Amino acid sequence: MDGFESNEGVILMAATNRPDVLDTALLRPGRFDRRVIVSNPDLKGRLGILKVHTRRTTLHAEVDLEQIARATSGMSGADLENLVNEAALLAARRERSSIQMEDFESARDKLAMGAERRTLVLPERERRRTAYHEAGHAIVAHLLPGADPVHKVTIVPRGRALGMTWMLPDEDRVGATSEELETRLAIFMGGRAAERIVLNERSTGASNDLSQATRMARAMVTQFGMSEILGPMTMDTGGEYMLGRDMGRVVEHSEDTSRRVDGEVQRLLTQADQRAQAILETNLAVLHSLADRLLETETIDSTEFVEVLETMGAHLPAGQPA
C-alpha cells in the first residue's frame, strides 16, 4: 500500500465478504478509507436486475417480472441471473418457445430447495411421518401472528430434505421483533410436535429444525437483548471463530451467566414447543386432513392450503393472541 503519491491518480479498490476481520492498518486514511456496503437488492433492484437478464430471452405474455421480484426476496444479482438461466433451460426441456411463469416457479423451487429426487422411493411409513411433519409446520405458520404466508408444502424429497414447508414474505424485511422470532421458534417446533402427537415418536427429521431454533434462541438471548432475566446486554459466547483473529480471545462473562444463558435458551425452546403442540392439538382434525392431502398429491400450493384450513375451521387455542 506504500509508494502511491497523491498526484498519481491511482484508485485502489478491493472487496471482501468479511469486513469484520480486516486489519485496521488497511483502513487508515490514504489507504482503503472509503467503504461502500453492497447488500442484496431490494424489490426495485431485483426488478431491474430481472429486466436486464431477461432482455435477450423470449418471455410469455403472462410473465410478471414484478411478481417474480416479490417472490425472490433475499436473492442476490447472481441468484437472479441463475434463476433466469434455469427457467430458460426448463422451458427448453419442455419444448416451449417462450419462458412461462411455471418455468420461473420451478426454477425458484430448485434454487431454493434443491432438485427433486423423484428416484428416491420412501417407505409408506416414512412418507406418512414426513406428511405430518410438514403439515405441522404449515398449520402453526398459518395461525400464528407475524409469520410469513405459507407458499408451498411438499413431501417430494429435495436435496437432503424429505419434505419442505416454504414461506414467502409479503415484503422485504430488515429486522424482527421478539414476538416474530418467538413465532418462528414455534414454527420450527411444529413438525416435531406433529410427529409426537399423532405418531407418538420422535425422529431425526427434526434435527435441522432444532439446530436453527437453537441458534435463533441463543441469538435472542446473547445478541438481541430479548431476555428478561439477562436484560439489555450482549455477550461473546465463543461462536464462529476465525483462525488467527480469535486466538487468545477472552470470554467476558462468568460461568453463572453462561448457565443462565443456557436456561433462557431452554426456556424459549420449551415454550415454543408447548405453543406448537397446543395449536396442533386444538386443530387435530385439520392436521389429519392436511397430511392426507399431502400423501395424495405430494405438493400443495398456497391457494389449496388456505382452502383446506378455512374449510376445516382452523383456529388458535383459547388465550393465544390472533
Image (cartoon, rainbow, N blue to C red):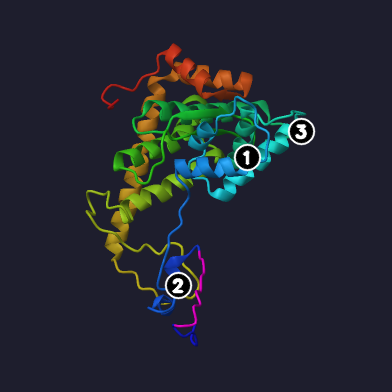
Q: Dot 2 corresponds to which residue?
A: 22
Q: Could you tell me the amino acid type at mark 3?
A: Arg
For disc 3, the marked residue is 93
The image shows residue 223 at horizontal and vertical percentages of 33, 56
Q: Secondary structure at mark 2?
A: loop
Give the mark toward the camera: 3 or 2: 3
Give the number of the disc on residue 54. Answer: 1
User: Which region shows up in magenta?
Assistant: 7-16
Q: Nearer the viewer, residue 288 or 95?
A: 95
Amino acid at pointer 2: Leu
Q: Is residue 100 left or right of residue 251?
A: right
Q: Is residue 195 above or below residue 208?
A: above
Relative vertical location of residue 231 with respect to residue 237 in this rendering, above or below = above
- What crowding class fits label 2: few (fewer than 14 Cα within 10 Å), some (14-19), or many (20 or more)? few
Mark 1 crowdedness (10 Å alpha carbons): few <14, some 14-19, many ≥20 = some
Q: Amino acid type of disc 1?
A: Thr
The rendered magenta stretch, by its main secondary structure, is classed as loop
Q: Could you tell me which residue is drawn at 27 percent across and 27 percent down?
A: 321
Q: Quadrant of residue 149?
A: top left
Q: Earlier in the sequence, mark 3 or mark 2?
A: 2
Q: Quadrant of residue 273?
A: top left
Between residues 76 and 273, which one lies in front from this camera angle?
76
Cα separation, mark 1 vs mark 2, equals 37 Å
